[in-house]
Image (tube, coloured by chain):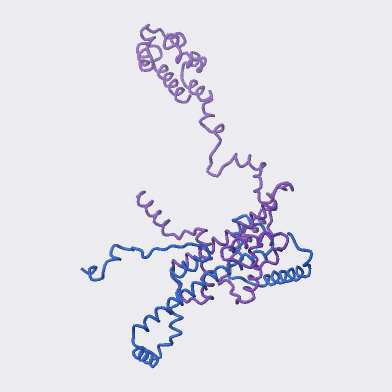
Amino acid sequence: MRKSRSKRKSNIHLQQPTINPRDFQFMITKVAVSQICKSVGFRRSCVSALETLTLVATKYLETLVKSAASFSNAASRTQSNILDLTNALHDMSLQVGFMGASTLYDHNNNCLLKSSVLESLSDFVSSTNEIPFAKPIERAKERESEEVNAVPGSFQERGCHIPEWLPRFPDVGGTNENCDKRVNGEQLWENSSSVLGCQIDGFEEKRCGSNNVGKLPKGRSRIKFRVNNGGGTRVGLNGISCNYVFGQSKDEEEAEPVAVCEKSVKSQEKQILVYKRRKKLC
Amino acid sequence: MNHNPQSSDGKHDDDSALSDFLASLMDYAPTIPDELVEHYLAKSGFQCPDVRLIRLVAVATQKFVAEVASDALQHCKARQAAVVKDKREKQQKVIYLCLLSFLISFGLSDPLLEQDKRLILTMDDLSKSLREYGVNVKHQEYFADSPSTGIDPASREE
């Protein structure tokens, strides 16, 4: 049954359309590129050709923007302006060539705002018909701003030395409360019942139940004796006369001295049980 | 920015032209949506609050795509014209005219419309036009979808 369930689950998971954000961007760009192709005069297109053109357009956009950003960074600015973009456009259109490309970096005669690339862009804007994108797209920023407005109280006032793009610090005050009670009922190890139950109270109760209360002064010291020195010292503590052979015996033979001695056999058995439990717990 | 003090009038003209162009971008809606461009800007580390620059990037990309596509269209048209020319050479003129009149009598054959229908963006034309822009695209001659793709239809039936 479990296997079949897991199989079903995996099948369902496979069947669900997974929306990859890269696919989403690619699809939007594809629609835009196909609109441009249609405006140029194509009626149909091969799928592979359209996808290739979309990919090239995306790469062009990214390269243009990255080189503009690097120009602004080289001028020790974080915000880019039209000069950076013009420089980037020049770099991108060097392959095709444009007016004034030969005197591009001649600072005496050249003004960036006179560039023929910008002129051709303005000509393009004025000459081509305006084709808006087919469908409106929801902005991601609006969603983010809504989320931010939803929890205004939890925001700490950030200092002016912290840039805006850094994430805010987690709330320090709320962490202790959160740690005390967790969702799944988990507890810290210090508070868990396995540690708290190891206290002597549990053993005291068991000793009270047995008849030989006075003969068992302290449990912990006795455990130490047994582990370190074997049976010899144990004899004196228990108050049981025992053979020398048995005194050297270890855990497996522990039942035998109890069987030999006739004094309070039941209480001895209980004691041994208590020892074993203590061993397990500790 | 460096500017030449001697041509200050020309510079003013350029500035006004540029500012007019940028102002016209405020009302212009490029085919590539602003949201998409903003996404790529943010991804590439381009910070700019000005909408006009975002539009400028979109217009530049649109111009690039439009140029590539129009080049591909020219390649496509040239190829089809060459094919038609070959056909004309092979066929006799009379037969061709008869065929044309026959088609026209049925009302099917607006030859210009048919040419429009044939305008398909293919990898051939696209790779030719992209090569001029420094992008080398090489595509497979064919894809072997199944083992029987390359085999003759007669042998496939057997």
Seen from this angle, which residue lies furthest left? B158
A73 left or right of A248 in image: right
In the rendered image of the structure, the colour used to display chain B is: blue
B29 left or right of B83 in image: right
Q: How many marks?
A: 0
B14 left or right of A240 in image: right
In the depicted structure, whether residue A223 falls above or below residue A85: above
Residue shown at the point (43%, 56%) measured from the top left:
A13
Q: Position of residue B25 (x, y in %)?
A: 67, 70
Q: Position of residue A208 (x, y in %)?
A: 50, 21
Q: Position of residue A4 (x, y in %)?
A: 35, 52
In the depicted structure, whether residue B114 falls above or below residue A232: below
Q: Position of residue A51 (x, y in %)?
A: 47, 65
Q: Nearer the viewer, residue A160 or A35?
A: A35
A149 left or right of B89 in image: right
Residue shown at the point (45%, 84%) measured from the top left:
B113
Picture quadrant where residue B55 is located:
bottom right
Residue shown at the point (40%, 54%) measured from the top left:
A10
Q: Nearer the viewer, residue A277 or B110?
A: B110
In the rendered image of the structure, the colour used to display chain A is: purple
In the depicted structure, whether residue A95 falls above or below residue A3: below
Q: Nearer the viewer, residue B94 or B17?
A: B94
Q: Nearer the viewer, residue B148 or A148?
A: B148
Residue shown at the point (35%, 49%) measured from the top left:
A3
